[in-house]
Image (cartoon, grey):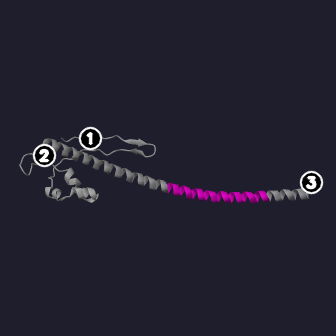
Amino acid sequence: MQSTAATTEGISSPHYGVYTLPTFKFQPRNESLDWRRISALDVDRVARELDVATLQENIAGITFCNLDREVCSRCGHPVDVVLLKVLRLAQLIIEYLLHCQDCLSASVAQLEARLQASLGQQQRGQQELGRQADELKGVREESRRRRKMISTLQQLLMQTGAHSYHT
């Protein structure tokens, strides 16, 4: 019942660029189920207390265990085929969700790196803008001084008379 899932060629967005999803393939189930560990769990307590740590501790053992050879501990008969299908389907769903979690984590890490790069670029842009504003301020001050100087020279020329220079 092993199968492979189709991979998406890529997701494209103007905001996020192109992100290619990693290839996904279901892994073989070759671990045996640890019945003692499972029987020691209080599932109601885990749900009531939102004990995610316990879920994380048991996720690999349950997801990748082989249930094909399991038998009823009371009568020794194989486990009901329909129940095995439900459990197998749950395993495949869990494995696919783990894959999605890994993809999302990688995507978040990539976006965080791009965000940091953008923030650095923005900071450099702000510094450049500040430098140019200071430069503009200096140029404006120089322009004001030169206008004042030109105005003063024009007044002096008017006072002395323009005809005195040409005889």
Pointers 2 and 3 in contact (C-beta within 8 Å): no
Find the magenta span and give its range.
120-148
Q: Nearer the viewer, mark 3 or mark 1?
A: 1
Q: Nearer the viewer, residue 118 or 33?
A: 33
Residue 12, horizontal then vertical, whole percent: 41, 42
| Residue of label 3 | 163
Using the image, tell me which numbered label, if any, was put on residue 132.
Answer: none
| Residue type pointed to by label 1 | Ala
Counting every numbered tag in the picture gives 3
Q: Dot 1, crowdedness within 10 Å: few (<14), some or many (≥20)?
A: few
The answer to which quarter of the image holds residue 88 is top left
Query: Label 2 neighbourhood size at 10 Å, few (<14), some (14-19), many (20+)?
Result: some
Task: Identify the secondary structure beneath mark 1.
Answer: loop
Residue 52's spot in the image, x, y percent?
28, 57
Residue 47, magenta (yes or no): no
Q: Residue at x 86, y 59 (%)?
A: 156
Q: Residue 143: where, in percent of width, then height?
A: 73, 57
Quarter holding the C terminus is: bottom right
Determine the secondary structure under disc 2.
loop
| Of the pair 47 and 96, the residue shown nearer to us | 47
Residue that carries the numbered disc 2 in the rendered image? 68
What secondary structure characterizes most of the magenta part? helix
Labels 3 and 1: the sequence-earlier one: 1
Query: In this rendering, would 156 be left or right of 27?
Result: right
Viewer-nearest residue: 133 or 43: 43
Q: Which is more foreground, mark 2 or mark 1?
A: 2
Depth check, mark 2 against mark 3: the one in front is 2
Q: Position of residue 115 (x, y in %)?
A: 45, 53
Q: Three-letter amino acid code at disc 2?
A: Asp
Q: Marks 2/1: CA distance?
A: 22 Å
